[in-house]
Image (cartoon, rainbow, N blue to C red):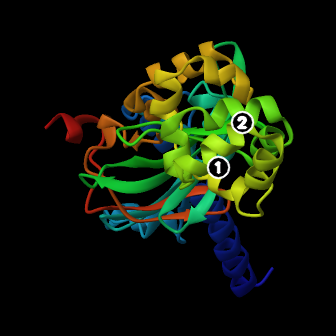
Amino acid sequence: MPLTAKLLIGVVVCALVLTLADRCAVLYAEREAAQRLRADLDLAAAPEVEIHGFPFLTQIARQRVDRIDVAVPDVSADRVSLARVRAMAEYIELRGDVLLSFDDLGRELGASQVRYRKLDDNAVRADGTVPVAGQMLRVRADARLQRDGGRGISTQISNMLLDVPEVASYRPGPDAGLRLHRPAAERIVRDAAKARALLSVPAIADRIGVPQRRVDQALRSDARLTELVGAPRFVQLLMGVNLVDVVRDHPWLLEKLGLDPKLLTALTALRLPELSERLALSFRMPEQARDVRLRDVVVRADGIHAELASNSLPLGAARAR
C-alpha cells in the first residue's frame, strides 16, 4: 500500500478516535455536571445537561466552555414547585426561564377546588369553591403579581367574592357587602309575605329609596304592595342594597331571604388575610441559587413565566468560598 494511502488512513483513524474521545468526554462532563447540580441545588432528581460546541476537548484546554443548557423539573420554591426551570450558560453569564404552572397550583397549595387562569399580563384570576359552614361556596378573586426583591414573586389579592348560588354574594373585608342575586330578589317580589317582611325594616326601605308613606300603604294593602314591588326597577334596586348590617340587626330576616343564619355568621367571621392566604401565589428561588435573579415576569395561558439572569452560579467548592 502506498505511503500516502497509509498516512491518509492513519489520519482518518486518528480523527475518528479523537472524535469518539471528544464525545465520550462530553457525555462524562454532562453526567458529572448533572450530579454536581443535583447535589449543590438539593434537587430531587438530576437535571438534564447538554454541552454544546465541538470539539469539547479544546474548550477544556482553553478553560472556557462555549455553552451549557440545563433543564430542571419540579424545583421547590417556597410554598409551590416550579414546573420547569431552564438555563443556558455562555462563558460566565447565565440566562434561562422558569414556569409556575397553573395546572399544579391547586394541588401544591392544598386547594384542589380552586383553579387559576390568566387575567392579564400581570394578574391571575382564582375561581373555585371553598367550604363555609357546611356549604360549598364559589370563590373568585384576583391575584396581582408583585416582585419580591428580585428573587421571588408574591401576589396582592383583591376583588374577592364568595357566592351562595341563586341567593347572594358576600364580599369580605373592611367594606364587607352582602347583596342578593336576581333569582332571590325575584322570589321576594313574587312572595307577598317576604316582600312585607323586607319592607318592614326601615333601613331597607330607606336604601331602596321608597318613601315611608308608600311603604306604610304597601304593608296595609295587597294592591299597593303589588304596585310597589312590581315596578320594573324594584328588583334591580333590591339587588343593589348591602344587607350586611341590616341582617345583623334583624337576624330573622335571613330565613325570609333564603339564607341560613349560620352561614352569615360564618361569613362575617372570615378574615380577609386568612382567605387571601388560601389563594395567594408566591415563590422564591432556592437559597442554593442565591446568585440568580428573576426578571421580566409575565402571566401567560399556562402559568407565570419569568426570566433568569446571573453573572455567575458558583457551585461546590467555589460556592463554599
Where does the C terminus fall, quadrant-wise?
A: top left
Q: Earlier along the polypeptide chain: callout 2 or callout 1?
A: 2
Q: Residues within 10 Å of mark 2 (few under 14, many from 20)?
A: few
Q: Position of residue 207 (x, y in %)?
A: 50, 49
Q: Position of residue 253 (x, y in %)?
A: 63, 24
Q: Is residue 174 above or below residue 237?
A: above
Relative to 82, is 175 on the left or the right?
left
Mark 2 and mark 1 in contact? Answer it, CB < 8 Å: no
Q: Nearer the viewer, residue 298 or 182?
A: 182
Q: Residues within 10 Å of mark 1 (few under 14, many from 20)?
A: many
Q: Is residue 240 visible?
A: yes
The label shown at residue 48 is none
Badge 1 marks a residue whose secondary structure is helix
Q: Position of residue 106 (x, y in %)?
A: 64, 34
Viewer-nearest of discs 2 and 1? 2
Which residue is rendered at x = 55% and y = 45% of the image? 205
Q: Nearer the viewer, residue 287 or 254?
A: 254
Badge 2 marks a residue whose secondary structure is helix
Q: CA distance from mark 2 to mark 1?
A: 21 Å
Which residue is rendered at x = 75% and y = 26% of the image? 258
Give the amino acid at mark 2: Arg
Relative to 215, is 166 on the left or the right?
right
Which quarter of the picture shows residue 40?
A: top left
Residue position marked by numbered label 1 in the rendering: 238
Relative to 49, is 218 on the left or the right?
right
Q: Is residue 224 above or below residue 174?
A: below
Residue position marked by numbered label 2 in the rendering: 220
Q: Position of residue 174 (x, y in %)?
A: 35, 39
Which residue is rendered at x = 67% and y = 29% of the image? 197
Give the amino acid at mark 1: Leu
Where does the N terminus fall, quadrant-wise?
A: bottom right
